[in-house]
Amino acid sequence: TRQFVAQLLPAGAARGRSDWTSNNKGNTGEEATTGVKGSPSHPLTRSPAHLIDADGLNCLAALPDWPNRLPARCVLTPHPAEMARLCNLPVEEVVAHRWELASERAAAWGCAVLLKGPYTVVAHPDGWLGVLPVATPALATAGSGDVLSGVIGGLLAQGLDPFTAACAGAYLHGQAGLRCEETLGRAGVIASDLLPQLPAVLHSLTAKEAAQEAARSLP
């Protein structure tokens, strides 16, 4: 239903701070985040799965004791600067210890954590760690993370658990980036260039799966 789809919209994606944080202009503090804190009418407390990105993460970082406010079945998708705010650490330390930090914080926060960057890291609260085998400048463009959030949000809406959705979404997004690099070049790619590549990536995967299934059925 329309209501269900609205509940699964990634929180904070494609929003500036003054737009996301409040009806008051420019707030990023406690009064600006009352909707995130547990109001029964807010999508973050009603929906079956949650993705928090961009200024949704900045709102969390501004709240006291924010990890205890997270809903169940949640995935956070920070880039290093956002992760630094969530952890109260220097960005340099986040970049230097991405794997360890993602694993440690996923366990501490009780949610899946996707830490963006070259070879994006996805951590499960129970210790599983996925590393995307992709590093391309084609993905280092404004809005690329919003596309990633949309892909993961779509997978969550189809019933995947947060860790699986984050891993699969990162893979699809990464493959779309590689296709852009191949067809458009390493520089000059914009976020909207990724969108037409996603159906092609999905088709390639399903075609490969069908071919493997056919081969297994041969006598």
Image (spheres, rainbow, N blue to C red):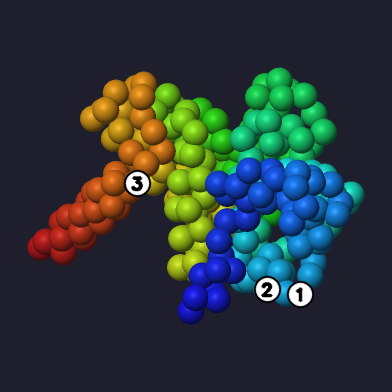
Q: Which residue is mark 2?
A: 46
Q: Are marks 2 and 1 in contact (CB under 8 Å)?
A: yes
Q: Please rate how many residues cluster around mark 2, counting C-alpha atoms within 10 Å: few if below 14, some from 14 to 19, many from 20.
A: some
Q: Residue at x 25, y 48 (%)?
A: 200
Vertical comparison of 190 with 4: above or below: above
Say whether residue 50 is visible. Answer: yes
Residue drawn at (53%, 35%) of the image = 120
Badge 3 local density, few (<14 within 10 Å), some, or many (20+)? some
Task: Give coordinates of residue 21: x percent, y percent.
Answer: 73, 51
Left or right of 50? Residue 167 is left
Q: Quadrant of residue 16?
A: top right
The residue to which callout 1 is attached is 40
Nearest to the observer: residue 199 or residue 39: 39
Nearer-N-terminus badge (2/1): 1
Amino acid type indicated by mark 3: Leu
Tell me the distance, in whole angstroms, between the alpha carbons under discs 3 and 2: 29 Å
Residue 203, image x, y percentages: 24, 53
Task: Tell me which amino acid carries mark 2.
Answer: Arg
Q: How many marks?
A: 3
| Mark 1 secondary-structure assignment | loop
Residue matched to label 3: 195
Residue type at mark 1: give it: Pro
Residue 160 vertical position relative to residue 98 in the rendered view, above or below? below
Question: In terms of secondary structure, where does tag 3 sit?
Answer: loop
